[in-house]
C-alpha cells in the first residue's frame, strides 16, 4: 500500500499541509500545494526533504513540541506517515489530541499494526535510507491497532498485509480523521 497517494489527494486543491515525522519527505515529492510545512527531529532527514519538496518550510523539531505551539485550526491537512509508532503511547496520544486541535480538515495517519495484542511491531535501528547518526529515532516505542485509532476518531481507509524488515507479518493501516 502506498500511503503517499492519500497525502497527494488530500492536498491536490492547494490545501495547506503539515507533515509530522516527515523523515526524508517521500510523501512530499510531487505535491501540487505550495503550502507545505515539514517537521522532523532529525536534521539529516530534513536536508533530504529540501531536495524532494523545495517549496516546503522545514522545521527540525519534535512533533509534540511543534504542535503545542501551533494555533487552533491553522492547517488544512496533517500527515503523520510511519511516525506515531516511534513515540511512546502517552506522547502519541498527546500528538493526536493536538493534531485534532490544529487541523481544519483531515488528519492522515499511517502506521504498522503488528500481531501483538497492542499492535506493536518491532523495529530496531537499521541506518534508514542510508543516513547515519539517527538510528535511535527508528526504534518503535508503541503499537497501535485499527480499533484503538477508530476509538480516537479515525476511520480505516486502507489496510494491507506486509512483512517487516525483520520478517514479521504486519498490517499496514491508513487511517483518516475528518474534521468538521
Image (tube, rainbow, N blue to C red):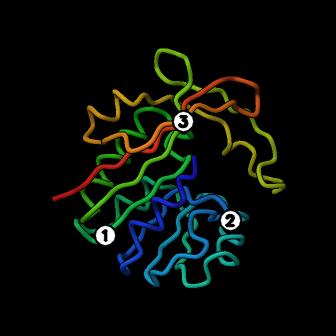
- Closer to the eye: label 1 or 2: 1
Which labelled disc corresponds to residue 76?
1
Q: CA distance from mark 2 to mark 3?
A: 31 Å
Which labelled disc corresponds to residue 9?
none
- Residue carrying label 3: 160
The image quarter containing residue 141 is: top right
The image quarter containing residue 126 is: top right
Mark 1 or 3 closer to N-term? 1
Task: From the viewer's side, name the closer residue of 138 and 108.
Answer: 108
Label 3 SS:
strand
On-image quarter of the C terminus:
bottom left
Task: Tell me residue 104's x, y (percent).
Answer: 24, 65
Label 1 SS:
strand
- Closer to the eye: label 2 or 3: 3
- Name the residue located 57 percent from the left edge and 63 percent from the top edge: 27
Crowd around label 3: few <14 · some 14–19 · many ≥20 (10 Å) = few
Q: Residue furthest left?
A: 180
The image quarter containing residue 135 is: top right
**Picture mark count:** 3
- Name the residue located 41 percent from the left edge and 70 percent from the top edge: 17
Q: CA distance from mark 1 to mark 2?
A: 25 Å
- Name the residue located 54 percent from the left edge and 47 percent from the top edge: 83
- Name the residue located 26 percent from the left edge and 31 percent from the top edge: 151
- Residue carrying label 2: 43
Amino acid at each position: 500500500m502506498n500511503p503517499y497517494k492519500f497525502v497527494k489527494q488530500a492536498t491536490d486543491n492547494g490545501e495547506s499541509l503539515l507533515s509530522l515525522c516527515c523523515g526524508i519527505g517521500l510523501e512530499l515529492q510531487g505535491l501540487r500545494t505550495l503550502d507545505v510545512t515539514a517537521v522532523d527531529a532529525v536534521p539529516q532527514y530534513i536536508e533530504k526533504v529540501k531536495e524532494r519538496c523545495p517549496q516546503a518550510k522545514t522545521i527540525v523539531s519534535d512533533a509534540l513540541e511543534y504542535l503545542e505551539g501551533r494555533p487552533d485550526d491553522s492547517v488544512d491537512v496533517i500527515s503523520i506517515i510511519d511516525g506515531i509508532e516511534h513515540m511512546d503511547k502517552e506522547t502519541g496520544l498527546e500528538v493526536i489530541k493536538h493534531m485534532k486541535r490544529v487541523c481544519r480538515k483531515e488528519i492522515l495517519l499511517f502506521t504498522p499494526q503488528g500481531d501483538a495484542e497492542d499492535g506493536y511491531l518491532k523495529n530496531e535501528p537499521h541506518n534508514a535510507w542510508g543516513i547515519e547518526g539517527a538510528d535511535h529515532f527508528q526504534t518503535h516505542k508503541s503499537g497501535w491497532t485499527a480499533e484503538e485509532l477508530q476509538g480516537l476518531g479515525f476511520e480505516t481507509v486502507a489496510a494491507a498485509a506486509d512483512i517487516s524488515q525483520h520478517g514479521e507479518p504486519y498490517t499496514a493501516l491508513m487511517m483518516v480523521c475528518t474534521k468538521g
